Amino acid sequence: MAGIVDVQRYPEACQTFRWSALWDLFDGDPERLNLAHECVDRWVGRGTALRLKHADGRTEERSFDELADWSSRFANFLEADGVLGGDRVAVMLDPSLAFYGAVFGTVKRGAVAVPLFPLLGPDGVRLRVDDCQPRRLLVARDAERWRELFPHVGVVAVDDGFLTRLAGESTRYVPATRADDLAVLQYTSGTTRGFPEAVRHTHRAIVTLMVAALYGLGLRRGDSYFCPSSPAWGHGLWHGTIAPLALGVAVGAYSGKFHAGRLAEALEEFRVTNLAAAPTVFRMLRGSGLADGRRFALERISFTGEPMDSRTWQWVEKAFGVTPCGMYGSTEVGVIIVNYPGFVGYVVKPGALGRPAPGWEVAIVDARGEPLPPSTVGEIAVRRKGGWFRVKDRGWMDAEGYFYHEGRSDDVIISAGWTMSAVEIEDALLSHPDVREAAVVAAPDALRGQIPKAFVVAERGDAVFTRELQEWVGARLSQHEYPRAVEFVEELPKTPAGKTDRRALRERAGGRA
């Protein structure tokens, strides 16, 4: 694969990029394409495909040959079991050979893979099962319980009996899918919606994904890559799994309940050179102290999902000797703003989302959809199908073309006529040495309409500290821009994907906890 992957200079990457060149990375074409073949089968004989760090401390490595065999056996199993092209197959397993083999085996078959987080409770699973109506549901435990709950679904326990049956299937399976066939249903973690939403991805999605892989993650052949996000959610599935495998790079994943010390061990043991994680993971590493004094091989670090506060950003630079690079996009269009990790000639600006990814035109627009001049706050939008598509976040652009995040459109706080950014207030709170975590949302107020309310995780938690924090933020932002209400909590609510659950905080701030 020569060409687009080998461009390592920022100006050249922008000048020479062509959307059509992404197809050169694949065996398939705009008519016939199979995501599983591109991620697994064509790399047989190329070495390691999976590097797993388990919560109990174990490490596990699996080759492309093993993954190809398992997934082909599973595709044959599905065919023999009556699963047809387009049928849904839900996979509720921890990261393992079985998880990846089942997902890619489903896609080989031409069915639709539906990864589900294994720690979802009955109500969470029911919402998704009722929505996507899977023919099969793979589980590691409590199979009888799930069969009672979903008698219309074929629940398959991945146990010794199943593995014995699977071993009798052929290790050869030839996919026959079109590029526009549905391949994956990926559920959102529900940070802004009351119910999970299924995002539909075709086999063709792997092509657009390469923009994020090359310019957002900075993936290169020969990388030792690691992404601790669960592959049941978007970041862990697309950026943590499909992006590296599509380039022949092994997946590095975490399996089980997250522990910062285990991640630090994995970074050392696997000699990880490229790490992608949510800002929450870096904050947990910072707070644990378990990364201090270790010898790491990191060369590139990326994050996405939410902004990284300046204190954590500075800690990452000091602890790893690497500048963290954010990337930004939306479910509908993919990654559109990147920081080009590893590219010569690109300067990362602290606090900036980055600059437009190759092939995208990005702007800040007003309420009428008209582009705004630099340093003016509006909505982030991308040129799509001849018009500006808003991505539901507010931000601004500086004179050099770097974009900055001001929070989701529903995170803007208008108090007594003043417009405030929840993101800025959070960042100022997190710069205080005694604050471990903080989140800010709009709370209703009879006099001002709304006020900023901060939920803070800290060792201290009295009225004196509340006033200290308000003065700390006001001194850094402005006299009116500080949290007028502060609530100290033991921990912030998180979605299963590791993001702060702002919907839950808004409900709590509005008296609907």
Image (cartoon, rainbow, N blue to C red):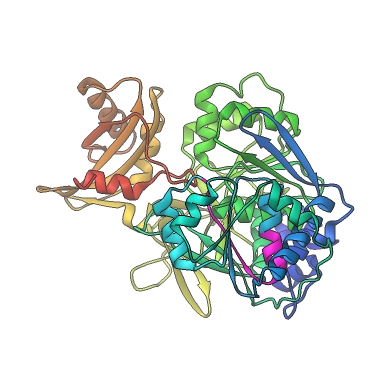
Note whether residue 327 is visible. Answer: no
Q: Quadrant of residue 178?
A: bottom right
Q: Taking 356 as reference, is 310 left or right?
A: left
Residue for point 70% across, 39% down:
52
Q: Which of 511 and 277 lies nearest the eye of the viewer?
A: 511
Occupied quadrant, residue 392 = bottom left
Which residue is rendered at x = 37% and y = 32% of the image? 491
Hey, which residue is sitting farthest right in the picture? 45
- Above or below 5: residue 318: above
Any part of residue 140 in sight: yes
Residue 504 versus residue 206 in the image, above or below? above
**Residue beneath the point at 26% across and 28% down:** 471
| Residue 315 shown in magenta | no
Side of 78 relative to 305 (left or right): right
Image position, residue 156 (x, y; %)? 60, 56
Q: Quadrant of the N terminus?
A: bottom right
Instruction: State whether residue 62 is above or below residue 211.
Output: above
Residue 495 or 81: which is nearer the viewer? 81
Task: Where is residue 439? Give x, y as percent.
Answer: 35, 39
Q: Nearer the viewer, residue 365 or 110?
A: 110
Q: Quadrant of the C terminus?
A: top left
Q: Residue furthest left?
A: 447
User: Compared with residue 369, is residue 416 higher up or lower down, i.e. above or below?
Assistant: above
Is residue 452 rendered to the left or right of residue 155?
Answer: left
> Does 108 lie within the magenta span?
yes
Percent across and percent down for residue 391 are: 45, 64
Q: Which residues are magenta?
A: 103-118
